Structure formats: C-alpha cells, structure tokens
Amino acid sequence: MKAILDHIGIAVSDLPASLAFFRDSLGLHLETSEEIASQKVRAHFLSTGRSSLELLEATASDSPIARYLDKRGPGIHHLALRVDDIEAALAHLKARGVRLIDERPRPGAEGALVAFIHPSAAHGVLVELKQPAPAVPLFRTVARHGLGDLELVTLSDGFIHLDGGAMFGVVPRALWEKRLPPDDANRIPLGMRPLIVRGAQTLLIDAGCGDKMDARSAAIYGLDRRYHLDHALAEAGLAVDDIDIVLASHLHFDHVGGFTARAANGAIVPRFPKARYVAHRGEWEDATHPHERNRASYLQENFVPLREAGVLTLVEEGAEVMPGVRFRWSGGHTPNHQVVMIESGGKTAVFTADMYPTSVHIPDAWGMGYDLYPMDTLAFKRAFAAEAIAREYLLFFEHDPSMAAGYLRESAGKRVVERVI
Ligand SMILES: [Zn+2]
Ligand SMILES: [Zn+2]
C-alpha cells in the first residue's frame, strides 16, 4: 500500500492561544474549520503545503479529545495518512495482523472516508487512514444518442492519469486546477471514450489504450481499467465480431492501444477480427517513422500488426469512411490529427479526439503541451468553435473524465458546454 502524510492532528485546550502561535507567529494559513458532531470536536486545518495541521478542539466534556487532554494535556494527538483505496488498505493491514480500531471505514470531514489503527499496533502513535472524497466525478456510463438515421453509442475504456501541466500547456495550474483538481502526483484523471456509430455498418472510432500496457507504464499513467471497452461493448449489446470498421483519429497509444490484442500464443493480432481498420495516410507515415518527440506516443505494436494482417486502409482528408461519417483535418496535436464529422438528418455530431480532449479545453488558447503544432491547434479551434456554436454540433469529448458529449453555447460573450451525455 502507498500512503502519503495528509495531516497531523494536535489536541488544543486553548484555541485562541494555539492560533496565535500556529497562524500568527508561524504564518500558516487557516484554511477551513469544521465541526464533527459525532466526535464532539471542532477541527481547524492550517495548510503546510501538501499536508496540513489539524487543531482539534473539544466541543463537549465527554468528547474523546477532552478525555485525551485530561489524561495527557495538549500536544500531538494523531497522524493521518492518505490512501487511494481505504478498503484495500484495511484488508492489507488486517491480513498482516495489525490491530485496528475501525475494521470498516467511516465518514470523516469533507466527504472523506477514515479509519483508525490502534496505537498499540503503531508503536504508541494513533494513526488515521484517510481516503479523500473524489475531486473529479468519473463518468463511465454507456449511453445512446440518436442522430438522424444513425445511432451513436459512447463507450469507456476506463481512465488514465496524465500530468495536469502537460495537459494544459502554457495555462497556469492556478487556472486549470479549479476545473480538474490534480492528485498528489500532479496528475488529472482523463477518460478514454471510444464512440460507436451504427448506420449502414457498425463503426468504432478509437478504442482506448487496450490491455497490452506493461505494469510499469500502467503505474506511471495511473491506468484504471477495472471497467474497460469489453465491458462497455457487452453493456451496449455488441461483441468484437459486430464491428465492421475501426477508425483512428490519430495513432497515439491512448487512442489505438485497443486496436490490437495479444493472442494466446503471444502474437499481436487485430482485436476486431471482422473489421477493416482505417487510418489517415499522413498520420500513418508519421507514426511508423517516429522521432524523439513523438516516439513514446507511437507504439508500433498498436498498428503495424494491422498492416501485416492485411486489414488496414489508408485514406486522405475528407474521406467518407461510411455514409455520414468522414475525416476532417484539424492538425495541431499531430500534423495530421483528424476529427470525425458525423452527419445525418440535418444534424451533426463531431468526435473531437485530442482537439478538444476535455470540455475544459474549450478556450482557444487552452491547448495541450503535447501538441506538436500549437499554433495550428489554435487556428483550427478558433474557426471550429464559431462553426460549432452556429450549427449546433454535438461535440464528443474523448478524454473528459465526467462528461461524454455536449453542445457548445455562447451566452453573454462566454462559451459554455451544455452537457448532453
Ligand atoms: Zn494524442
Ligand atoms: Zn489523447
């Protein structure tokens, strides 16, 4: 288990005097105060960077803190360690014979789950485990949307965690962290949302990162595929054999890792046995001739086996892949990054891939540090946004952790996304 110091709890008998020292003399910032009725305690949190001090004040004479003060006087009361999965942490400790005060997590301050380890098992220290409330709600639902004669089905291949700074390029953290709060490693959760288009045939756009990633990379990227594309397809009533066409917005691993799979004999084979795979010719050339700057994103095992299996078709800009579905060049992210225009019955949906990776990337200048040609991204976004608002395009956000699709609206000079899925 991995634990990070969250806070140190200090029992105080004279709060004003304690604040005069910790806040005024030491200059620590008082962030929040919260009454925890069940514990008959008021907690005051002072920030010390990634962790904090928690001044604990008894609110009744029979409060556990009041009893502690009677017995031992003011001072350090407990330390709290932050864990990702408190259930797993408790199970791990229990299996090692560690004596616990709480065998099950219980609700703590600010929506967190907490549990205490007995001081006799922790060399005289009262240790609290804390699993914070999720900072970003994760949406993994399979959902259907009718578009003229076509049916769109949004899927999920789980979540990946990428560096927040890299995801927002030159935008300062002070601005983006309010929208997508990062974890302790400065990473933000990102969805991987392939899209099914059902019409003349059944077409799949992108396929998430798949299951070939090694354990080390999976840890670096915080890969969470407890629920992945196979689950989503099953939930949508589809099997891998039902997919006729697989389309790549571009060939980065988080979009096409799921194009191939490892067979029982170790060979890497097309994941969708009856499908024709379609990629942009220029993107294919770049992906198969990588350089230092893009090599980590273009993993050959994700697409070269498709050519070897004879199931690959390369197309140019504007190619109609299936009636109502066509590629449109956006560039910027990679020189030949494509968005996918989906049109039927006078309505238009757009799979925006890494052009608008999340709904937070709507402002024209909020581009990714990963973009190879950021000025091209900016120019495309500027023109595209006006068009999307005027023509009411339904936009699909492949990496948004909490939303699959929405309309871009402008009201009082501000752009907002009206969530649909
Ligand atoms: Zn990409
Ligand atoms: Zn991506």
Image (cartoon, helix red, strand yellow):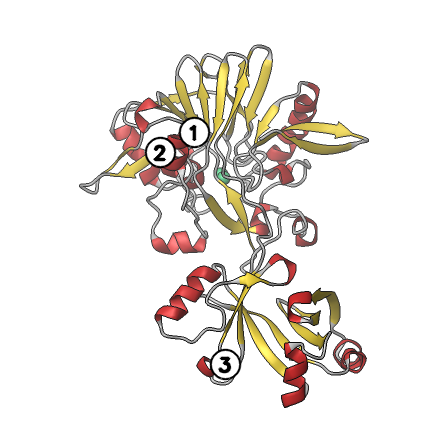
Which badge, 1 or 3, comes first in the chain's sequence?
3
The tag on residue 259 is 2
Indicate the position of residue 368 as horizontal and vertical percent values.
Answer: 58, 43
Q: Amino acid at mark 3?
A: Pro
Of 319 and 264, which appears nearest the observer?
264
For label 1, the SS is: loop
Tell me whether circle 1 and circle 3 mark residues in contact (CB < 8 Å): no
Q: How many angstroms separate mark 1 from mark 3 (CA)?
A: 55 Å
Q: Is residue 198 left or right of residue 333?
A: left
Q: Secondary structure at mark 2?
A: helix
Circle 2 packing at 10 Å, graded few (<14), some (14-19), many (20+), is: many
* Quadrant where the N terminus is found in the figure: bottom left
Residue 75 visible: no
What's under tag 1, amino acid-wise? Ala
Task: Name which residue lies at 36% across and 42% down.
Answer: 299
Q: Nearer the viewer, mark 1 or mark 3?
A: 3
Q: Are marks 2 and 1 in contact (CB under 8 Å)?
A: yes
- Within the image, what quadrant is residue 301 found in? top left
Query: Mark 3 and mark 2 in contact (Cβ < 8 Å)?
Result: no
Q: Which residue is mark 3?
A: 119
Q: Please rate how many residues cluster around mark 1, counting C-alpha atoms within 10 Å: few if below 14, some from 14 to 19, many from 20.
A: many
Q: Which comes before the other along the chain, label 2 or label 3?
A: 3
Residue 404 in the image, given as x and y percentages of width and height? 55, 33
